[in-house]
């Protein structure tokens, strides 16, 4: 049981690392694309909102992984 948990936890940590690295690599291109697609007034209001959304998504992800 302990061995299975150790293998599983390393697998989970690898998955988290892969997801975070992909997210970090893709985030600038996504941000640039959304800025190009959005009109200027909406763009100014949405930047703080999207940042807050990202934070809440990450918090939910961390809570799920810690359970």
Image (cartoon, rainbow, N blue to C red):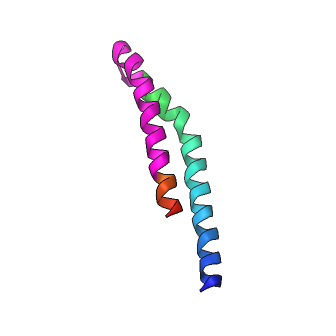
Stretch of the chain drawn in magenta:
36-60
Q: Position of residue 10 (x, y in %)?
A: 64, 69
Seen from the viewer's position, the closer of residues 13 and 29 is 13
Q: Position of residue 9 (x, y in %)?
A: 61, 70
Image quarter (top left, top right, bottom left or bottom right) of the N terminus: bottom right
Prevailing secondary structure of the magenta residues: helix
Q: Is residue 5 above or below residue 67?
A: below
Nearer-the-camera pick, 48 or 20: 48
Taking 67 as reference, is 56 above or below it?
A: above
Q: Residue at x 48, y 47 (%)?
A: 59
Tally of numbered discs: 0
Q: Nearer the viewer, residue 1 or 17?
A: 1
Residue lying farthest to the bottom in this orientation: 1
Q: Residue at x 35, y 13 (%)?
A: 41
The answer to whether residue 55 is magenta is yes
In the image, 43 versus 48, the foreground residue is 48
Give the percent coordinates (x, y) of residue 31: 48, 30
Instruction: List x then y, in percent, for residue 54.
Output: 46, 39
Decide: is 26 above or below 35: below
Q: Quadrant of residue 17?
A: bottom right
Q: Is residue 4 above or below residue 67?
A: below
Outermost residue to the top: 41
Residue at 55% across / 53% down in the picture? Answer: 19
Question: In the image, is residue 53 part of the stretch drawn in magenta?
Answer: yes
Q: Residue 4 lies in what quarter of the image?
A: bottom right
Left or right: 34, with 17 as reference point: left
């Amino acid at each position: 049981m302990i061995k299975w948990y150790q293998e599983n936890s390393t697998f989970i940590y690898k998955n988290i690392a892969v997801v975070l690295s992909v997210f970090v690599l893709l985030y600038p291109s996504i941000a640039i694309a959304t800025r190009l697609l959005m009109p200027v007034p909406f763009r100014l209001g949405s930047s703080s909102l999207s940042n807050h959304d990202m934070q809440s998504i990450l918090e939910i992800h961390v809570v799920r992984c810690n359970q």
